[in-house]
Image (cartoon, rainbow, N blue to C red):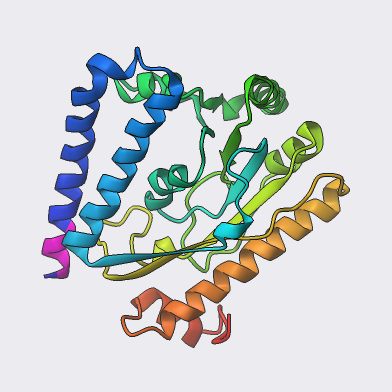
Amino acid sequence: MLHLRSALFTVLFYISNAVQMIFWSPVFFIMPRSDAWKVAKSWGYSHLWLQNVICGTRYDFRGLENIRPNANQLIASKHQSAWETYTMILFFKDCSYILKRSLIYIPVFGWYMAKMRVVPIDRSRGKEALKSITKNARHHMAETERQIIIYPEGTRKRPGAEPFYKYGITHLYGDLDVPVQPVALNSGLYWGRRSMVVRPGTIIMEFLPVIEPGLAPERFADRLETVIEEATNRLIAEAAASDQPPPLAVELVQSGQVSATG
């Protein structure tokens, strides 16, 4: 039943994406961005509902008191699954993403991303890419209070994998002089990268206390990685001790990669 439910969810997930994009296209691109966000958030809620109904996934959002929904800031999140890409937007008024430039050229999807004023990055350009995203991010924040979501490791990582935080987030923190909101989660235990299996259980997303601007680059980088990784390991350990422990969480605790207390 697990694989059947997962397959059904995957099929309906992609059908839902296509149908919603086509349905909203006649009006989405002429809406002001404030109204367009209502469409984007309804899209996110619909997929949370779909995953809950078909796969039995539940959700626990913690640290909501730490969120500053209307302030200029960077949102630095752990990235384990497709799940957080459409869930994160539900908590902010006018957020943006730093994402691969190539995604902008996907028909329809790319048009939606352009409408929402995302910050594209061409990773092949090295230092020039950092200058470009800094310029774009500063421009977006000058227009209105915006939250720019970045995945510091650059790509989805398997829970328990050795962390590798890239310099981009540290560069933006120093150059933009704005607070950073760290986010920990355990979504990869239930819907892993490159996996078609979506497991029942409770996905937890935790918004951690904001890191204020002004820290030296090395101190900031160390603090960001430490708080996110410690919180993520705690959430993995909690999942391993739950009534529906995902196999990967149990494996990580039993192997000693994650302590039983997180």
Of the 4 image quadrants, the one containing the N terminus is: bottom left
The residue lying toward the viewer, choosing from 18 and 87, is 87
Q: Position of residue 56 (x, y in %)?
A: 22, 67
Q: Residue at x 29, y 53 (%)?
A: 48
Give the side of residue 194 with respect to residue 164, left or right: left
Residue 26 colored in magenta in the image? no
Which residue appears at 71% of the width and 56% of the height?
224
Q: Nearer the viewer, residue 197 or 88?
A: 88
**Rendered position, 63 above or below 98:** below
* x and y percentages locating residue 238 in the rendered image: 48, 80
In reply to whether residue 5 is colored magenta, the answer given is yes
Total labels: the figure holds 0
Say left or right for 168 vs 5: right
**Does residue 161 appear to the left or right of 211 in the view shown?**
left
The overriding secondary structure of the stretch rendered in magenta is helix
Which quadrant of the view contains residue 112?
Answer: top left
What percent of the width, then of the height, locates residue 47? 27, 48
Choose between 40 and 229: the one closer to the eye: 40
- Magenta extent: 2-6
